Amino acid sequence: MEFAGKDRQRGIHFNLKDSLKPYRELFLQRFVLRKYPAGHLFNMAGFPPVGLFYLVEGEVHIYTTSSQGDIRFIGIHRENTLFNLDSFRCGCDAVITSKAFGPVQALPITQQQLFELMAEYPQLGRDLLCYVGDVLRLMCYDAEAQSIHDVKTRLIRFLLVYSADSHTLVVPLSQYSIACAINASRIQVARVCGELKQAGLIQIRRGKILLTNRETLEQYEQHLLSFEALPPQR
């Protein structure tokens, strides 16, 4: 089955994985592998960042938290990626929270250690710049989607992007997690999921959503986008 949707072609990756895989053995040789339990906080927004990490195994969720305690789910790091990128800006508090989703194995790396490695392997610096570009594109995509589209469009786009990026028809996230990702309430997400289920486009399971008709869901997304593009009636 082909999963290369429009957002995939635009280089939008909600699940970051294997971006730095060619350097996996190099990182393993140079740095000390550590194990972290599920729920471990690598970074917390509003506090000094603890440094960079190369993810060897497991899954790390990235999110922000407002002053009112509202959570905004941003993305997922998987194997062979570098996370806690805001540690590059020394002297500033972290703007994101990173948390282990299940057991994690990672390599702690200081900014200076990474700079020294980049001086030794210039291609690493170039590839790291492209990787940071992928992260930036996700942030810009997220900002565009949240500021322009309604909840239904945001939810459908999220499901399609997640599906295309993971090459699967299953989105293994609860409705609450999805609500956090698209800046909506759980009630709003539940209502839209109910409509999509009734239309035969998705199935709802405990802690996950199955896309039963991805092609029609893509067509429905385009219909919603074209409707949003219509000029307001006077």
Image (cartoon, helix red, strand yellow):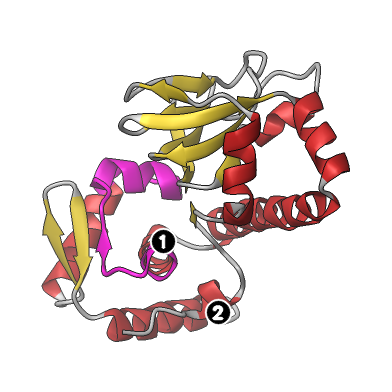
Question: Which image quadrant for residue 158?
Answer: bottom left
Q: Quadrant of the C terminus?
A: bottom right
In the depicted structure, whether residue 107 falls above or below residue 229 = above
Residue 155 is situated, as x and y percent measured from the top left of the image, at: 37, 60
Q: Secondary structure at mark 2?
A: loop
Q: Residue furthest front?
A: 29
Range of magenta residues: 162-187
At horizontal 20% and vertical 53% (from top left) the residue drawn is 208
- The residue at the point 37 percent across, 84 percent down is 2
In the rendering, which numbered label is found on residue 158? 1
Mark nearer the viewer, 1 or 2: 1
Q: Name the residue: 61% across, 56% down.
A: 22
Residue at mark 2: 233
Question: Which mark identifies residue 206?
Answer: none
Task: Report the number of numbered marks.
Answer: 2
Judge whether residue 8 can be spotted in this image: yes
Crowd class of label 2 (few under 14; some 14 to 19; many from 20; radius 10 Å): few
| Amino acid type at image mark 2 | Gln
Amino acid type for the residue under numbered disc 1: Phe
Is 32 or 210 nearer to us in this picture? 32
Indicate whether residue 126 is drawn in magenta.
Answer: no
Q: Residues within 10 Å of mark 1 (few under 14, many from 20)?
A: many
Q: Nearer the viewer, residue 152 or 63?
A: 63
In the figure, residue 116 lies in which quadrant? top right
- At mark 1, the secondary structure is helix
Q: How many angstroms separate mark 1 from mark 2 (CA)? A: 29 Å
| 116 shown above or below 179 | above
